[in-house]
Amino acid sequence: MESDKVVEIYTDGACSGNPGPGGYGAILTYKGHKREIQGYSSYTTNNRMELLGAIRALEALKYPCRVRIYVDSQYLKNGITNWIHSWIKNGWRKKDHQLVKNADLWKRLWDLIKVHDVEWSWVKGHSGHSMNERADELARTAISLGERGTLKEDQAGRLPT
């Protein structure tokens, strides 16, 4: 990985009801270029949208690189930087032996961060951070677009039945 190739990513998830329709938004920036992505799931949770926003952003990268990813979800940041190691060791079970929720998405995210050199940072949501606010706007807009049928559903975000 070339050290000068640092992509900054800002992601957020949103849900109208929890569970309910949800959306995610992500902004990828690299050397002055910016790309925005968003997605929608008709029946999901906020946590699934937080995870899927990060997943889709990392999947959008065309080659391995250094990534700084900014999230406002403690669930996502703590899960991927701390909790995931014991989940894997314990066969995707928590300390209380219950199955880890959203394991399908955690596994996808885990595979993706093995490809890239990822640094995770938490930013306080709704605190005026322009890129976090924009990611939130993309996520909320995705819900509206999806409900109107103008944004195709991202099936990976739906709650397993």
Image (tube, rainbow, N blue to C red):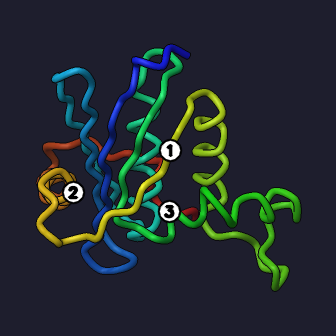
**Nearest to viewer (mark 3 / mark 1):** 1
Residue closest to the eye, 5 or 16: 5
Q: Is residue 100 positioned above or below 7 on the image? A: below
Amino acid bearing label 1: Glu
* Residue 21 position within the rendered picture, expressed as x and y whole percent measured from the top left: 29, 66
Amino acid bearing label 2: Asn
Residue closest to the eye, 4 or 37: 4
Q: Which residue does the numbered mark 2 point to in the structure image?
A: 132
* Residue 115 position within the rendered picture, expressed as x and y whole percent measured from the top left: 61, 27
**Nearest to viewer (mark 2 / mark 1):** 1
Q: Residues within 10 Å of mark 3 (few under 14, many from 20)?
A: many
* Residue 75 position within the rendered picture, expressed as x and y whole percent measured from the top left: 50, 70
Q: Which residue does the numbered mark 1 point to in the structure image?
A: 119
Q: Which residue does the numbered mark 3 point to in the structure image?
A: 76
The reply to whether discs 3 and 1 touch (Cβ–Cβ < 8 Å) is no
Secondary structure beneath label 2: helix
Task: Tell me the residue at 60%/64% (across/down).
Answer: 79
Q: Residues within 10 Å of mark 2 (few under 14, many from 20)?
A: many
Q: Is residue 145 left or right of residue 10?
A: left
**Labels 3 and 2: the sequence-earlier one:** 3
**Quadrant location of the C terminus in the rendered image:** bottom right
